[in-house]
C-alpha cells in the first residue's frame, strides 16, 4: 500500500498541473477547518491523506500542491500508484512496501524513509517520506497520512562532507538542519550553529552536556534505543520523532536520522541530523481534530429528529446523502443512495408539481436558500407534513449543482393549525358555498354560442362576479364585475349587484340603461371607499352584434378568427358607486361591435393581468392575448385549462392577493 493517493479530484488552475480539491466535509466546516484547508493546500511540505474503510480498502486520496511540485507529477498523475512507482528508485520502492506492510500488520504506526524520485524532466530528487496512520479503538487503520520533504540539498551536502573537510565546514555553517555528534557516554561533542538559530541555546551551552537534558522525559527511552540501534547497524535512515527543549522552556517536535562513525579514540559515536517538524506535527494534529469533529457532527446529525439530505439538481432529485433520521418515515438511507427511491418520488403526488415548480423558480432566480412545506408519503403509506429549509450549491459558473435540505416533521403543528383554521373559517366556508351557488355552474344551452369561465377567489369568498343573463328570446347578456375589496363585505356587495342586475336586465335591450339602473340602486348601500367595476354586453343572436358598456372595468378582448390583431373594447364609463346618477350617466358610453363565427370574446378581471411572479413582474395583457390567440379549433374548456396552468407556473413563488375571473364567449 502506497502513501501516494489514487486519483483525487483536480483543478486545472494548479501551478503544478492540477490543484488540491478537498472533500465536501472539509469545505462546509467551521472557520477552524477552513483555516486548516488553507494551510493544507499551501503547506511548505508535501502532504497527502486518505481514509481506509472497515475492510481495509483505501478511499479517495488528497494531495496538496507541494506534493505534486516535488515529484514532478500533477495531481491526476500522482493519484496513480503505477505512475509513482515508475519514477521511484526500485530499491527505495521495495523498502517502502515492506514498511507499509508492517503498518497494516500492526507492527508499527508509521515510518520515515529517504527515497529517490527520478523525475520525468531528468532531475533526480531525494525526499524524506514520513507515513503515519490513525487507528480506531479496535486497532484498525482508519486514516493514512504522508508527508514529503525535499532533502536533496542535505543529502548532497552529506555526500560532499564525506569527500572534503572544507566542504564539511561550509555545510556546518549553512545547513538549516541541526547537525550534532554524541559521545558513547551520551554527551554532545559537537553541534552546528543551526542549534542556536533553531533552539536558542548557544553552542557553548550545549557542548559537554548529556542529551537527556534537552529531550522530553517521555521521549528519552525512544532516543536511547535509537542511538543504540544506530551504533549497532551503522546507518539508521528510518529516523524518530521526539520533543526537544528550547531555551525558553517550550517543547517543539524534532525528527532525526543518524549514523555511526569512529571518533579519534577509535570508539563508535553517534552523528545525527535533526530538523524542526512542528508545522507537520501541528497539521497532523489538526487533521485528527477535524476528523474527530466530523465524526461528532455526523453523530449529532444522525441523532437529530430533523433529516439532512443532499440531492443533485437533476431530474427526479437523485440523493447523494441522507441522514439516519430518515428512518422515522420508514425508509433506510440506502433506499435513496442506491437510487431505489428519490425524494421527488416520496413527495405526495398532489404536492409534487407545486414543489417542483417552486424549486425550478428558486434556481432560476439564483436564490441561495429557500423554504417549502409539503407532504411526504411514508413507507407505510401514511402522510406527514414537513418543513424543508434548503441551501443551494452553485459551481464556479453559477450553475446549480446540489440542494442541501434540512427536513423537519411539522405534522403536529399542521394538524393544530388545521383544527384552528377549521373553526375559524367554518362560517367563511359556508358563505363561500352560498356565493359559489350564485355563480353559473352550467351555462344555458345557447346553440349559437360557446361559453366557458374560470373563477378563483383569493379567499374563501371573493368580490369577482360573472354571469350569463337571458334578456329575451334572441338576446343574452354577458357580465363580469370586480368589487374593490375582499372578504365578507365584498361578497355581500357582489351578491347585491348580481340580484339587482338580473332584475334590471330582463327585457331591457339597452346595456347602458341596465347599468344606470343598477348604479342608482346600489349607490346608497355602497360602503365608503368601495366601488364596483363592471363590463356588460348584450349579444343579439340574429345579427351577432354585441352592444356593451364598460363601467371602469378592464377593457374586454376580442380576438378575431384568422389571426387578425386583437380588439380592445374600451368604451368610457365610471365605476359603480362613485356617483349616484348625473355624472355616472353622462360618462357611460354604449358601443356595439359585430362578432364573427370563431371570434373569441374574453371578459376578465385584473386578478389575471396583475398576477405577479417572484420578481414582481405582472402577467399582463400581452401574455393573456398570446395564450388565447390561435385557439379557434380548441374547445373552450381546454383554453381555460391552458391559461390556468400558465398562470400557476408564472406566479408559483408569489402570493395571490386578488380574485381571478375569466369569461369566454365564442360564436359558432
Image (cartoon, rainbow, N blue to C red):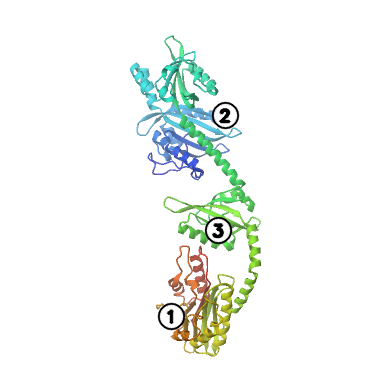
Viewer-nearest residue: 389 or 161: 389
| Kind of element beneath mark 3 | strand
Dot 2, crowdedness within 10 Å: few (<14), some or many (≥20)?
few
Distance between mark 1 and mark 3 Cα atoms: 42 Å
Between circles 2 and 1, the one closer to the viewer is 1
| Kind of element beneath mark 1 | loop
Distance between mark 2 and mark 1 Cα atoms: 91 Å
Dot 1, crowdedness within 10 Å: few (<14), some or many (≥20)?
some
Viewer-nearest residue: 187 or 10: 187
What x and y, as percent, mark residue 596?
45, 84
* Residue that mark 3 sits on: 372
| Residue 124 visible, this orientation | yes
Q: Which mark is residue 570?
A: 1
* Residue that mark 2 sits on: 106
Q: Residue at x 54, y 88 (%)?
A: 471
Q: Is residue 667 left or right of residue 378?
A: left
Between circles 1 and 3, the one closer to the viewer is 1
The residue at the far left in this view is 166
Mark 2 or mark 1: name the one nearer the start of the chain. 2
Q: Is residue 429 left or right of residue 652?
A: right
| Kind of element beneath mark 2 | loop
Mark 2 or mark 3: name the one nearer the start of the chain. 2
Specify the quadrant of the image occupied by residue 440. Answer: bottom right
| Residue 440 visible, this orientation | no
Asked if labels 3 and 1 touch by Cβ distance under 8 angstroms, the answer is no
Amino acid at each position: 500500500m502506497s502513501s501516494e493517493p489514487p486519483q483525487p479530484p483536480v483543478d486545472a488552475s494548479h501551478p503544478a498541473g492540477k490543484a488540491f480539491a478537498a472533500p465536501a466535509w472539509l469545505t462546509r466546516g467551521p472557520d477552524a477547518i477552513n483555516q486548516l484547508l488553507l494551510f493544507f493546500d499551501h503547506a511548505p511540505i508535501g502532504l497527502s491523506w486518505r481514509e481506509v474503510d472497515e475492510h481495509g480498502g483505501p478511499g479517495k486520496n488528497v494531495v496538496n500542491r507541494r506534493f505534486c511540485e516535488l515529484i514532478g507529477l500533477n495531481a491526476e498523475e500522482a493519484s496513480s500508484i503505477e505512475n509513482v512507482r515508475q519514477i521511484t528508485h526500485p530499491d527505495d520502492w521495495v523498502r517502502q512496501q515492506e514498511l507499509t506492510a508492517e503498518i497494516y500488520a500492526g507492527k508499527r504506526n508509521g515510518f520515515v524513509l529517504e527515497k529517490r524520485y527520478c523525475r520525468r524532466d531528468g532531475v533526480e530528487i531525494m525526499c524524506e517520506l514520513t507515513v503515519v496512520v490513525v487507528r480506531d479503538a479496535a486497532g484498525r487503520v482508519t486514516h493514512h497520512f504522508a508527508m514529503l520533504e525535499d532533502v536533496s540539498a542535505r543529502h548532497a551536502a552529506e555526500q560532499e562532507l564525506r569527500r572534503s573537510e572544507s566542504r564539511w565546514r561550509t555545510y556546518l555553517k549553512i545547513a538549516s538542519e541541526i547537525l550534532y555528534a554524541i559521545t558513547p557516554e551520551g554527551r554532545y561533542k559537537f553541534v552546528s550553529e543551526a542549534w542556536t538559530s533553531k533552539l536558542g541555546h548557544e553552542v557553548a551551552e550545549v557542548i559537554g552536556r548529556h542529551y537527556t537534558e534537552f529531550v522530553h522525559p517521555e521521549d528519552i527511552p525512544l532516543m536511547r534505543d535509537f542511538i543504540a540501534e544506530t551504533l549497532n547497524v551503522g546507518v539508521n535512515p528510518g529516523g524518530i520523532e521526539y520533543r526537544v527543549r528550547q531555551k525558553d522552556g517550550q517543547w517543539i517536535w524534532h525528527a532525526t536520522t543518524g549514523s555511526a562513525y569512529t571518533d579519534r579514540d577509535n570508539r563508535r559515536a553517534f552523528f545525527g541530523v535533526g530538523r524542526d517538524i512542528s508545522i507537520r506535527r501541528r497539521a497532523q494534529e489538526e487533521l485528527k481534530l477535524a476528523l474527530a469533529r466530523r465524526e461528532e457532527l455526523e453523530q449529532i446529525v444522525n441523532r437529530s429528529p430533523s433529516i439532512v439530505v443532499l440531492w443533485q439538481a437533476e431530474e427526479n432529485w437523485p440523493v447523494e446523502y441522507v441522514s439516519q433520521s430518515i428512518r422515522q418515515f420508514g425508509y433506510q438511507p440506502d433506499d435513496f443512495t442506491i437510487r431505489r427511491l428519490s425524494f421527488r418520488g416520496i413527495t405526495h403526488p398532489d404536492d409534487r408539481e407545486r414543489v417542483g415548480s417552486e424549486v425550478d423558480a428558486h434556481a432560476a432566480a439564483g436564490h441561495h436558500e429557500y423554504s417549502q412545506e409539503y407532504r411526504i408519503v411514508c413507507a407505510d403509506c401514511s402522510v406527514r407534513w414537513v418543513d424543508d429549509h434548503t441551501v443551494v450549491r452553485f459551481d464556479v459558473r453559477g450553475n446549480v449543482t446540489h440542494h442541501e435540505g434540512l427536513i423537519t416533521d411539522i405534522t403536529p403543528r399542521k394538524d393544530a393549525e388545521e383544527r384552528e383554521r377549521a373553526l375559524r373559517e367554518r362560517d367563511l366556508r359556508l358563505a363561500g358555498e352560498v356565493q359559489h351557488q350564485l355563480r353559473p355552474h352550467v351555462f344555458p344551452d345557447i346553440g349559437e354560442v360557446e361559453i366557458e369561465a374560470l373563477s378563483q377567489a383569493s379567499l374563501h369568498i371573493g368580490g369577482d362576479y360573472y354571469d350569463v343573463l337571458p334578456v329575451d328570446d334572441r338576446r343574452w347578456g354577458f357580465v363580469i364585475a370586480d368589487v374593490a375589496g375582499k372578504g365578507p363585505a365584498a361578497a355581500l356587495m357582489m351578491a347585491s349587484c348580481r340580484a339587482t342586475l338580473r332584475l334590471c336586465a330582463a327585457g331591457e335591450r339597452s346595456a347602458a340603461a341596465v347599468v344606470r339602473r343598477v348604479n342608482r340602486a346600489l349607490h346608497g348601500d355602497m360602503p365608503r371607499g368601495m366601488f364596483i367595476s363592471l363590463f356588460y354586453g348584450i349579444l343579439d343572436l340574429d345579427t351577432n352584434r354585441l352592444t356593451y358598456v364598460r363601467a371602469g372595468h378592464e377593457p374586454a378582448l376580442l380576438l378575431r378568427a384568422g389571426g387578425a390583431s386583437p380588439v380592445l373594447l374600451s368604451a368610457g364609463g365610471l365605476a359603480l358607486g362613485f356617483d349616484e346618477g348625473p355624472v355616472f350617466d353622462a360618462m357611460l358610453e354604449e358601443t356595439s361591435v359585430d362578432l364573427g363565427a370563431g371570434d373569441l370574446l374574453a371578459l376578465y378581471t385584473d386578478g389575471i393581468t396583475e398576477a405577479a411572479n417572484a420578481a414582481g413582474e405582472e402577467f399582463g395583457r400581452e401574455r393573456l392575448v398570446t395564450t388565447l390567440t390561435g385557439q379557434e379549433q380548441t374547445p373552450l374548456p381546454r383554453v381555460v385549462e391552458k391559461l390556468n396552468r400558465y398562470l400557476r407556473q408564472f406566479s408559483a413563488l408569489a402570493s395571490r392577493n386578488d380574485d381571478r375571473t375569466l369569461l369566454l364567449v365564442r360564436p359558432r
